[in-house]
Image (tube, rainbow, N blue to C red):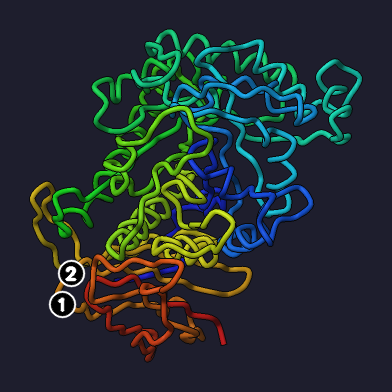
């Protein structure tokens, strides 16, 4: 590997380390919110959960959905809690009690250190509800909805910057599913109305729900044909799993993500050329993760209960490796991927798990997420890499070394993220860092485990990082031993 200061991709937008909380399963009720818990604050939110979220340094959280938002009336979640209605929640076949709504979540997010990416309902609703919600949230006062917010105890506007125009509207499973033309027209008119209320906002249009959609990437082209000048981002969603227990193939799935990003960028740039526009469309990868472990359990769930366990994937060590690889993919596309949301944050396909009324713990995927969020701030550099490769059942020429590099010029740190995909052999990394004269190795963090299926529980943390990585620096050449199937963070700092 060659790393040089001059090989700049782009400044990393910290929002690529965002996450997602939906009114789904135990994400809210029993997750971030549990008034009966010993650690609950005066508003009913768990401080022990909040502390782990602060440890992750989550810059932005998408809310309130997700499939949930396409049937959500935001007015149900404001005003006196005792008078809020309980609603049948059609997306996940539960009952939504509406104990937590806009004001409660905004207060909690501020305490957690996160901004909010708010989604509006373009499934069962549309322009009118969206313009009223942004007036409620962002307008300073002297109007019906801004004054209503003040009556509800929030005197100052929230000034939410980032808004999603619906969720996965290409999906037949979505309440209010639309064709690309139907969605594009509605998104355009909604965007226009919302910007009239607050011209400073950023807007995200719905892209394809995954690469396997039959309308991909035509959906993006048609949607952007309507909305290109009215929005700032197009969304991408993708989940991966390993149901066939083929780990070599599974760890290569970030190559599919890379192809997904390239295809969407190409489509955006085609519409830019078609419209003779000077504007460049950026990407918001606002749902991504591993999701497959809980499918069988979810298929047996009884409908119409409040906050049942749903989508509670128990993540193993190989899942952590793939999550790390997906994060590296975002860093290598820092010039166009400006936001990303790990879906989700607590209990629901999440890095953080809780017991109802009990303990909280870190899943295996917590660690690569924490490492990149903490150390991956600065400029993404393009490493020149020569790595041995392998062929898997669905992918060919898969590099054993997956990597990304971030240079924090202000604090004089260089961080090399390196994933060894080889399942049985270590890799010897030789890295030329001569352009970083005077730098020394500060630490080499390793996440490794001989058992690819090892999991963490409330009783035992089997998968946790250590700082015993083997690396040396001599005359500008870094050499490191990357253990088999391992996640590595090598940090250099100017002496």
**Considering depth in this image, is 261 or 183 the residue closer to the camera?**
183
Question: Residue at the location (46% across, 83% down)?
Answer: 443
User: Which labelled disc corresponds to residue 294?
Assistant: none
Q: Quadrant of the N terminus?
A: bottom left
- The answer to whether any part of residue 398 appears in the image is yes
Apparent side of residue 192 relative to residue 425 in the rendered image (left or right):
right
Contact check, label 2 and label 1, Cβ < 8 Å: yes
User: Within the image, what quadrant is residue 235 found in?
Assistant: top left
User: Which labelled disc corresponds to residue 422?
Assistant: 2
Q: Which residue is mark 1?
A: 425
| Residue 18 at x, y percent in the picture | 53, 48
Q: Secondary structure at mark 2?
A: loop
| Residue 453 at x, y percent in the picture | 25, 65
| Residue 76 at x, y percent in the picture | 68, 22
Question: Residue at the location (36% across, 30% down)?
Answer: 209
- The answer to whether any part of residue 335 appears in the image is no
Q: CA distance from mark 2 to mark 1?
A: 6 Å
Mark 2 Cα shell of 10 Å, populated few (<14), some (14-19), many (≥20): many
Q: Secondary structure at mark 1?
A: loop
């Amino acid at each position: 590997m060659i790393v040089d200061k001059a090989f700049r991709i782009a400044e990393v937008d910290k929002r690529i380390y965002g996450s997602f909380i939906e009114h789904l399963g135990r994400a809210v009720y029993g997750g971030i919110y549990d008034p009966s818990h010993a650690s609950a604050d005066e508003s009913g939110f768990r401080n022990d959960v909040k502390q782990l979220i602060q440890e992750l340094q989550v810059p932005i959280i998408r809310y309130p959905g997700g499939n949930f938002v396409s049937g959500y009336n935001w007015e149900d979640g404001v005003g006196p809690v005792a008078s809020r209605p309980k609603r049948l929640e059609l997306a996940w076949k539960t009952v939504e009690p509406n104990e937590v709504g806009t004001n409660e979540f905004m207060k909690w997010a501020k305490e957690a250190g996160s901004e909010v990416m708010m989604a509006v309902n373009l499934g069962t609703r549309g322009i009118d509800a969206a313009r009223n919600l942004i007036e409620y949230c962002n307008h300073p006062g002297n109007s019906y909805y801004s004054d209503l917010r003040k009556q509800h105890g929030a005197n100052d506007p929230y000034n939410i910057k980032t808004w999603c125009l619906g969720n996965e509207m290409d999906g037949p499973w979505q309440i209010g599913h639309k064709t690309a033309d139907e969605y594009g027209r509605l998104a355009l008119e909604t965007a226009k109305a919302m910007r009239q209320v607050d011209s400073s906002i950023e807007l995200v249009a719905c892209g394809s729900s995954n690469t396997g959609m039959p309308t991909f990437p035509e959906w993006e082209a048609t949607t952007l044909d309507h909305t290109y000048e009215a929005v700032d981002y197009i969304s991408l969603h993708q989940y991966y799993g390993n149901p066939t227990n083929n780990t070599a193939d599974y760890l290569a799935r970030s190559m599919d993500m890379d192809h997904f990003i390239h295809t969407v960028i190409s489509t955006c740039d085609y519409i830019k050329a078609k419209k003779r526009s000077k504007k460049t469309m950026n990407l918001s990868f606002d749902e991504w993760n591993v999701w497959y472990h809980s499918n069988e359990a979810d298929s047996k769930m009884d409908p119409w209960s409040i906050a049942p366990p749903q989508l509670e994937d128990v993540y193993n060590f190989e899942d952590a490796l793939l999550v790390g690889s997906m994060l590296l993919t975002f860093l290598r596309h820092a010039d166009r991927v400006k936001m990303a949301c790990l879906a989700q944050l607590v209990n629901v396909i999440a890095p953080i798990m809780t017991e109802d009324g009990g303990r909280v713990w870190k899943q295996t995927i917590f660690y690569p997420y924490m490492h990149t969020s903490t150390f991956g701030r600065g400029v993404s550099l393009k490493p020149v890499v020569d790595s041995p490769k392998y062929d898997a059942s669905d992918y060919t020429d898969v590099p054993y070394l997956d990597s990304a590099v971030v240079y924090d010029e202000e604090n004089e740190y260089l961080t090399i993220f390196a994933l060894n995909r080889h399942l049985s052999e270590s890799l010897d990394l030789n890295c030329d860092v001569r352009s970083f004269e005077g730098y020394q190795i500060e630490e080499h963090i390793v996440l490794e485990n001989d058992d690819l299926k090892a999991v963490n529980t409330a009783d035992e943390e089997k998968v946790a990082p250590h700082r015993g990585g083997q690396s040396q620096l001599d005359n500008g050449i870094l050499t490191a031993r990357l253990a088999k199937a391992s996640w590595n963070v090598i940090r250099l700092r100017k002496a």
